[in-house]
């Protein structure tokens, strides 16, 4: 991978990480004072559903945050952009679309097939 391409990917990763940190901080501020809902049972139920959805989204974003850190670490180690399955270089356009990708398309398809089979 060219140095310019690696710099572009690193910038994407850092911008995404900063965005996730901002979202997490906003969520913490919103929920810091606890859940205050006034209304009937339907209002309470709707608020609880929205809160649970927000928590699930934050959990997903936390996983993405860890993947970003891992990708940034791999950049610093010089191992970024290699498939963890077959050790072949990942396509730049794949990494640009999904900078936290750790498997090539073929290995990812095999992984998903195993997950479908054993799920």
Image: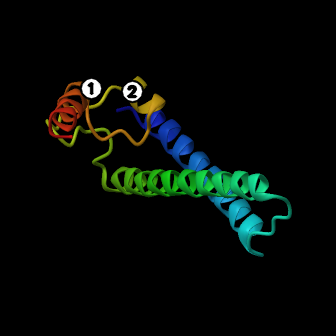
The mark found on residue 105 in the picture is 1
Q: Estimate the x, y position of residue 31 in percent, counting from the top left.
A: 72, 68
Question: Relative to 89, is 119 above or below?
Answer: below
- Dot 1, how many residues are within 10 Å of its Cα: few (below 14), some (14-19), or many (20+)? some
Locate the N terminus by quadrant: top left
Answer whether labels 1 and 2 touch (C-beta < 8 Å): yes
Q: In terms of image quadrants, where is residue 106?
A: top left
Label 2 sits on residue: 94
Q: How is the image coloured?
A: rainbow
- Dividing the picture into quadrants, the one containing residue 63 is bottom left
Left or right of 78? Residue 57 is: right
Question: Residue 84 falls in which quadrant of the image?
Answer: top left
Above/below status of 100 relative to 28: above
Residue shown at 25%/39% (left/top)? Answer: 82
Q: Is residue 52 left or right of residue 39?
A: left
Counting from the top left corner in percent of width and height, residue 40 is at 82, 58
Q: Tag 1's secondary structure? A: helix
Residue 30 disc label: none
- Closer to the chain start, of discs 1 and 2, is 2
Task: Assess disc 2: are there few (<14), some (14-19) or many (≥20) residues with their C-alpha within 10 Å of its C-alpha.
Answer: some
Which mark lies nearer to you, 1 or 2?
Answer: 1
Quadrant of the frame with the C terminus: top left
Question: Residue 36's x, y, as percent?
Answer: 80, 69
Most extreme residue toward the front is 41
Q: Residue furthest right?
A: 38
- The kind of secondary structure element at disc 2 is helix
Q: Please indicate whether residue 43 sits to the left or right of residue 28 in the image.
A: right
CA gap between label 1 and label 2 equals 9 Å
Residue 8 point in image, percent of width and height = 52, 36
Q: Residue at x 75, y 58 (%)?
A: 41
């Amino acid at each position: 991978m060219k140095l310019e391409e690696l710099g572009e990917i690193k910038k994407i990763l850092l911008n995404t990480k900063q965005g996730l940190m901002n979202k997490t901080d906003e969520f913490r501020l919103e929920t810091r004072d606890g859940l205050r809902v006034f209304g009937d049972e339907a209002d309470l139920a709707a608020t609880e559903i929205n809160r649970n959805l927000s928590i699930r989204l934050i959990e997903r974003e936390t996983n993405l945050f860890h993947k970003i850190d891992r990708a940034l670490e791999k950049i610093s180690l010089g191992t970024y952009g290699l498939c963890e399955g077959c050790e072949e270089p990942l396509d730049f356009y794949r990494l640009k679309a999904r900078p936290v990708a750790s498997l090539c398309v073929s290995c990812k398809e095999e992984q998903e097939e195993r997950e479908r089979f054993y799920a």
